[in-house]
Image (tube, rainbow, N blue to C red):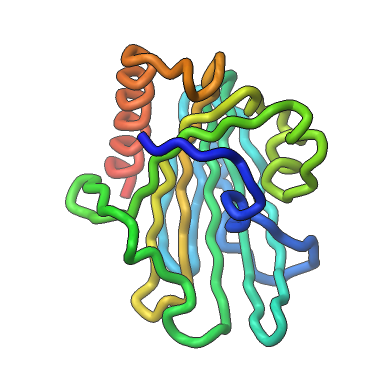
């Protein structure tokens, strides 16, 4: 398990600027299932009695690059899922994750990053990152740490990317992660992935 400290660089993927946008890569069905369209298409079933994090659609402008982003989530007491889809008009290959290991899920290969993130309440209060603000709006507990698996799917031309992040709160911080916690996390994550595969 890789362990990192939360920094601006670690969460840069999620930073966004609020704007009114026409793109809507993520929506919810009447039954609460997440419907993803755009760079890739998928349905993510609602996990049990999870609360829905309503979609947000924003645009980031970096000089001549326009990055369109949609994000949404599912939240339970100690675990949660974040999904983000983004597209860019930057040159081919701008969005890439080829340096990450492959995580086999069913008959598909996803690039994956596994990590544990320590974060204090002071850091949370001081940070105005859009991800933190989104999580706080739904009273998601991320202090003192979260364990996460981040899965990436990138279009062949590198102009679109989808991210599915499965996270679970870690009582006591990353140093306190036990073999029992790891086993429970892996089992819950496996069940979540199976639900996606069964639906698509």
* Image point (55%, 66%), residue name: 86
* Image point (73%, 50%), residue name: 130
State the image coordinates of residue 162 (x, y, percent, origin top left): 46, 59
80 horizontally vs 98: left or right: right
80 versus 69 height, above or below: above
Task: Report the number of numbered marks.
Answer: 0
**Near-viewer residue (167 or 11):** 11
**Near-viewer residue (179 or 104):** 179
156 horizontally vs 10: left or right: left
Q: Quadrant of the N terminus?
A: top left
* Image point (63%, 28%), residue name: 142
Identify the image quadrant of residue 69: bottom right
State the image coordinates of residue 96 (x, y, percent, origin top left): 41, 69
Q: In the displayed image of the protein, which residue is found farthest to the left?
A: 107
State the image coordinates of residue 110 (x, y, percent, origin top left): 30, 54
**Near-viewer residue (10 or 155):** 10
* Image point (32%, 27%), residue name: 186
Identify the image quadrant of residue 17: bottom right
4 versus 170 height, above or below: below
State the image coordinates of residue 168 (x, y, percent, origin top left): 50, 27
């Amino acid at each position: 398990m890789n362990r990192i400290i939360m920094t601006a660089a670690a969460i840069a993927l999620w930073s966004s600027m609020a704007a009114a946008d026409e793109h809507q890569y993520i929506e919810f069905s009447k039954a609460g299932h997440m419907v993803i369209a755009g760079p890739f298409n998928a349905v993510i079933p609602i996990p049990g009695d999870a609360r829905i994090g309503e979609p947000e659609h924003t645009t980031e402008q970096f000089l001549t690059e326009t990055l369109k982003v949609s994000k949404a989530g599912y939240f339970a007491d100690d675990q949660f899922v974040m999904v983000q889809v983004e597209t860019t008009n930057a040159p081919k290959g701008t969005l890439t994750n080829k340096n990450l290991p492959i995580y086999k899920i069913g008959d598909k290969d996803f690039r994956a990053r596994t990590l544990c993130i320590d974060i204090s309440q002071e850091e949370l209060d001081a940070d105005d990152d859009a991800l933190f603000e989104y999580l706080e709006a739904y009273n998601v507990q991320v202090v003192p740490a979260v364990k996460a698996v981040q899965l990436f799917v990138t279009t062949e031309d590198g102009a679109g990317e989808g991210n599915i992040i499965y996270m679970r709160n870690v009582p006591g911080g990353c140093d306190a992660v036990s073999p029992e916690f790891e086993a429970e996390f892996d089992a819950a994550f496996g069940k979540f992935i199976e639900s996606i595969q069964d639906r698509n």
